[in-house]
């Protein structure tokens, strides 16, 4: 067995799910919460995003908000087509799952929905939520303003989040899913590079003195950079503005705001016509004449869906350091930190305006 093989652990999908649920249980999450988070990170791993897969549980375990009181996720303001939720300091993979379900229900009934969430953290892959929406035959849009890890062009310190945006569109086949950060490198991937002792690509980060660096630990003390210079910065600012709409101004550090938008295509076109036209558009683009050496024109999400299908059969390979860290998480890593009546409602969803 070569060194690379010894550094990896091969798991069946069921074994990976059990490992995730066990680790999340050690952090204090109940069965429902653990199931939601486990399915989210398992799907990320299946789609080939190792840094958003089982390693994400370690990000949750090390997050400072984990050790602060939680309470009900509740609707602060709600209409037929909108809802603003206080996430109750619950992990975002749970709060955004509920937000996406709310958006789907409202959009199915009224044609459109917009849902904001604040006071939440570690939401995982935006693609996960918009794919849920697209598989409900709706168009999904998910802008995020996140933890300040990105410096503006010319800036010395972080002032913006990696601020991703995700889209998903139903078609006659698999949905078209687009999920991209506005930073040159994603923070979760940075943390994975630190744990592995790996360097960063050129041009994605600065150290604490503002100097370009490939050292992941130095970048963590400094800042990531926007992709594409001022263009990425402009998109990051747009995501930050959407975050304000989602309530980031009332969040614990005025950074985190998560927005979900769901649109029924037949507000403008009959659903089947829309899906047919989307499918034909994708096929037309894939038929573009190719440059020498290019085997195919691949659209966003196509690789992830192929890898998901393959890994559902073959299982998931993860870094042994990640595996060992998940196995060795101490029981009760999540301290008893609730107060009064919140003791019995850890992380639950409460649809009560207030």
Image (cartoon, rainbow, N blue to C red):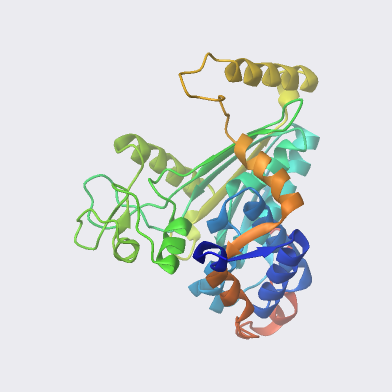
* Viewer can see residue 354: no
155 or 8: nearer the eye?
Answer: 8
302 or 94: nearer the eye?
Answer: 302
280 or 253: nearer the eye?
Answer: 280
Side of 331 relative to 228 (left or right): right
* Viewer can see residue 275: yes
Q: Classify the position of the C terminus by image quarter.
A: bottom right
Q: Where is residue 76 in the image (x, y as percent from the top left)?
A: 64, 57
Side of 153 relative to 137 (left or right): left
Residue at the front extreme of this rendering: 1
Q: Where is residue 243 in the image (x, y as percent from the top left)?
A: 49, 48
Q: Quadrant of residue 299?
A: top right
Q: Where is residue 172 in the image (x, y as percent from the top left)?
A: 76, 25
Note whether 261 is above or below 266 in the view shown.
Answer: below
Q: Quadrant of residue 90?
A: bottom right
Q: Where is residue 237 in the image (x, y as percent from the top left)?
A: 39, 42
Q: Residue at x 49, y 74 (%)?
A: 64
Q: Which residue is drawn at 60% across and 59% down?
A: 53
């Amino acid at each position: 067995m070569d060194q690379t093989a010894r550094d990896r652990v091969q798991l069946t999908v069921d074994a990976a799910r059990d490992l995730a649920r066990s680790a999340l249980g050690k952090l204090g999450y109940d069965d429902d919460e653990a199931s939601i988070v486990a399915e989210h990170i398992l799907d990320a791993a299946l789609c080939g995003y190792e840094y958003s897969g089982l390693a994400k549980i370690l990000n949750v375990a090390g997050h400072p908000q984990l050790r602060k009181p939680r309470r009900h996720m509740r609707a602060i303001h709600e209409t037929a087509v909108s809802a603003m939720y206080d996430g109750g300091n619950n992990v975002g993979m749970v709060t955004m799952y509920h937000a996406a379900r709310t958006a789907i229900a409202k959009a199915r009934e009224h044609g459109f929905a917009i849902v904001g969430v604040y006071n939440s953290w570690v939401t995982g892959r935006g693609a996960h939520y918009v794919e849920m929406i697209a598989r409900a035959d709706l168009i999904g849009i998910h802008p995020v303003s996140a933890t300040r890890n990105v410096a503006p062009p010319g800036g010395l310190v972080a002032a913006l989040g990696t601020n991703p945006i995700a889209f998903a569109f139903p078609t006659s086949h698999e949905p078209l899913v687009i999920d991209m950060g506005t930073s040159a490198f994603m923070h979760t991937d940075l943390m994975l590079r630190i744990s592995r002792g790996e360097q960063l690509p050129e041009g994605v980060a600065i150290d604490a003195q503002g100097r370009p660096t490939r050292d992941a630990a130095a970048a963590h003390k400094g800042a990531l950079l926007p992709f594409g210079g001022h263009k990425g910065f402009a998109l990051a600012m747009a995501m930050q503005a959407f975050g304000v709409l989602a309530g980031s101004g009332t969040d614990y550090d005025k950074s985190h705001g998560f927005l979900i938008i769901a649109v029924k295509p037949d507000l403008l076109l009959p659903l089947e016509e829309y899906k047919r036209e989307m499918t034909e558009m994708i096929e037309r683009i894939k038929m573009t004449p190719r440059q020498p050496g290019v085997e195919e024109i691949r659209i966003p999400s196509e690789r992830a869906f192929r890898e998901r299908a393959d890994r559902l059969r073959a299982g998931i390979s993860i870094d042994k350091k990640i595996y060992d860290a998940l196995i060795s998480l101490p029981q009760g890593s999540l301290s008893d930190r609730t107060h009064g009546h919140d003791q019995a409602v850890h992380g639950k969803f409460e649809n009560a305006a207030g």
